[in-house]
Image: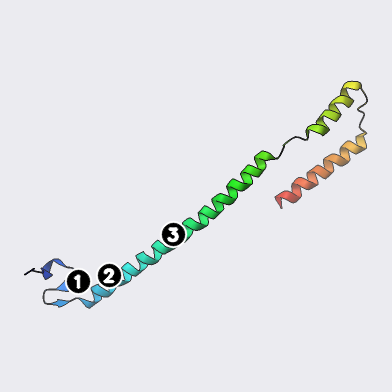
Amino acid sequence: MNRVDLNSSPDVDQTRVNPTRAVERSTEIKRMDEARRGEESDRVSLSERAAKIQELTKRARETADIREDKVEGLRRLVQSGRYDPSPQDIAEAIIRHEAELKSRRS
């Protein structure tokens, strides 16, 4: 026959169960269980976010940073001495560029 030592359990008061401690322990176990479930859903959410970041990073790497065709055309114009932008065009391009940067920050 197996013997149970009731004195070693914090939920037992010598001859009877301590109901307050038993309820506290039960509540604590439920909280731990809920927290564990919450962590699992966080992991799924992070995994989805990580996949999206990876996809966007891949797309960014595949996109050329420099428009080679435009650069080559301007290079030929400069080398031939035919590149002569007007100051008005340069000023307007700077203003457009600054406005675009400002709208991205907002």
**Residue at screen point 36% across, 65% down:** 33
**Residue at screen point 93% across, 34% down:** 86
Residue 73 in the image, given as x and y percentages of width and height: 86, 30
**Residue at screen point 81% across, 33% down:** 69
- Vertical placement of residue 98 versus 71, above or below: below
Image-based side of 59 in relation to 69, left or right: left
Q: Amino acid at mark 1?
A: Asp
The residue carrying pointer 2 sits among few (fewer than 14), some (14 to 19) or many (20 or more) residues within 10 Å by Cα, namely some
Mark 1 secondary-structure assignment? loop
In which image quadrant can residue 14 be found? Answer: bottom left
Image-based side of 19 in relation to 70, left or right: left
Q: Nearer the viewer, mark 2 or mark 3?
A: 3
Q: Which mark is residue 25?
A: 2
Tell me whether the residue at label 2 lies in contact with that at label 1, contact meaning CB atoms closer than 8 angstroms: yes
**Residue at screen point 11% across, 77% down:** 15
Q: Which mark is residue 73?
A: none
Q: Which residue is mark 3?
A: 40
In which image quadrant can residue 59 be found? Answer: top right
Looking at the image, the residue that sits furthest to the left is: 1
Image-based side of 55 in relation to 95, left or right: left
- Pick whichever of labels 1 and 3 is earlier in the sequence: 1
- Pick whichever of labels 2 and 1 is earlier in the sequence: 1
Q: Which residue is mark 1?
A: 11
| Alpha-carbon span between mark 2 and mark 3 | 23 Å
Mark 2 secondary-structure assignment? helix
Q: Nearer the viewer, residue 86 or 8?
A: 8
Residue 83 in the image, given as x and y percentages of width and height: 91, 27
- Vertical placement of residue 35 versus 66, above or below: below
- Pick whichever of labels 2 and 3 is earlier in the sequence: 2
Tell me whether the residue at label 2 lies in contact with that at label 3, contact meaning CB atoms closer than 8 angstroms: no
Q: Amino acid at mark 2?
A: Arg
